[in-house]
């Protein structure tokens, strides 16, 4: 694909892991993104990650950067909450911006505050909120809720979170005709005592359960608040174990938690061969 070496940083935020590349010089062309993501995100065969993030020059003066976000299967997503927190820290530490900063995504502009490894991002205004949908499946119907917090999320409230077959049921709902053509991420959520939530997410584009999903945790908190089950700030325990904090102020939704560096590396050209 290319001869020269590519530098990257591997990061994770609540167990959602990403490969970040500074692409300010434009070495990776837009049409190369999907294939690069698919190749690099393969676990065991390459670096392995839930997604690839390319950090690029902003379109608007004053903004810190624009990004291109790719899921592990190479599909481009409009937004990613955990990836956004990693990207904001990356930009600050690479000297591209100072906190607070604003970056550009396909979903819209995202404001971020970075304080060491602690990062808070304000998501785009939630849209398409639908509470109490009847979701017909072959065996039975489920009650589902839906909101787009940058990317589409279905939320299903459950009692027995450990018993949910997230992979099988998540995949069925992700491709359910009610959510086509875009599809949906699927979040199974348990309301715990004292207004906390626990969550497991099937992610579109990873096509599996991930250890966390920031826009998913935010969607769950927003829906639980609208149903009168929790109050802001809402602690959401992810599958990876970290508790994310979701702040809800009217239409404003912010996501706060750790964004950690794992290692830096460079890719040998042969890593990009078929
Ligand atoms: N993990 C992300 C969401 C990434 C995009 C998603 N898989 C999609 O395609 O909708 C997050 O932390 O929000």
Image: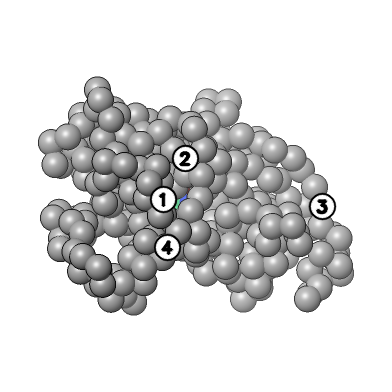
Q: Which residue is mark 4?
A: 168
Residue 28, numbered label: none
Upstream in the sequence, badge 2 or badge 3? Answer: 2
Where 272 falls versus 259 (above or below)? below
Q: Which residue is mark 2?
A: 239
Are the residues flagged by discs 4 and 2 in contact, CB closer than 8 Å? Answer: no
Across and down, in percent, residue 182 comes to: 36, 72
Q: CA distance from mark 2 to mark 1?
A: 8 Å
Q: Quadrant of residue 269?
A: bottom right
Is 81 above or below relative to 233? below
Q: Is residue 215 left or right of residue 75?
A: left
Q: Of the residues tagged 2 and 3, which is closer to the observer?
A: 2
Which dot, 4 or 1, sits closer to the camera? 4
Task: Choose the circle earlier in sequence order: 4 or 2.
Answer: 4
Neighbor class of circle 2 (other Cα within 10 Å; few <14, some 14-19, many 20+) is: some
View quadrant of ligand 1 = bottom left
* Residue 94 visible in the shown view: yes
Mark 1 beta carbon near ligand 1 (under 8 Å): yes
Q: Is residue 81 visible?
A: no
Rendered image: mark on residue 266: 3
Q: CA distance from mark 3 to mark 1?
A: 31 Å
Question: CB of residue at label 3: within 8 Å of ligand 1?
Answer: no
Mark with earlier residue (3, 1) = 1
Determine the image quadrant of residue 195: top left
Q: Residue 201, labelled with which disc?
A: 1
| Front of the two marks 4 and 2 | 4
């Amino acid at each position: 694909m290319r001869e020269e070496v590519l530098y990257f940083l591997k990061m994770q935020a609540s167990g959602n892991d990403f490969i970040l590349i500074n692409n300010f010089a434009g070495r990776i062309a837009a049409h190369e993104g999907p294939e690069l993501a698919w190749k690099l995100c393969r676990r065991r065969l390459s670096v392995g990650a839930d997604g690839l993030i390319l950090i690029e020059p902003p379109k608007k003066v004053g903004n810190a950067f624009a990004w291109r976000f790719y899921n592990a299967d190479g599909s481009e997503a409009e937004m990613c909450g955990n990836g956004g927190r990693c990207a904001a820290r990356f930009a600050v530490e690479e000297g591209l911006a100072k906190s607070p900063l604003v970056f550009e995504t396909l979903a819209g502009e995202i404001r971020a505050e970075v304080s060491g490894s602690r990062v808070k991002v304000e998501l785009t205004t939630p849209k398409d909120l639908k509470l109490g949908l009847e979701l017909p499946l072959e065996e039975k119907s489920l009650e589902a809720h839906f909101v787009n917090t940058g990317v589409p999320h279905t939320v299903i409230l459950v009692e027995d979170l450990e018993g949910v077959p997230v992979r099988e049921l998540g995949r069925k709902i992700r491709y359910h005709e009610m959510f086509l053509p875009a599809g949906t991420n699927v979040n199974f959520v348990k309301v715990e005592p004292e207004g906390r939530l626990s969550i497991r997410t099937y992610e579109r584009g990873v096509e599996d359960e991930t250890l966390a999903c920031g826009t998913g945790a935010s969607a769950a908190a927003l829906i639980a608040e609208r149903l009168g089950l929790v109050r802001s700030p809402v602690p959401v325990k992810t599958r990876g174990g970290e508790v994310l904090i979701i702040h809800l102020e009217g239409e404003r939704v912010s996501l706060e938690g750790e964004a950690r560096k794992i290692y830096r590396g460079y890719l040998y050209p042969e890593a990009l061969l078929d």
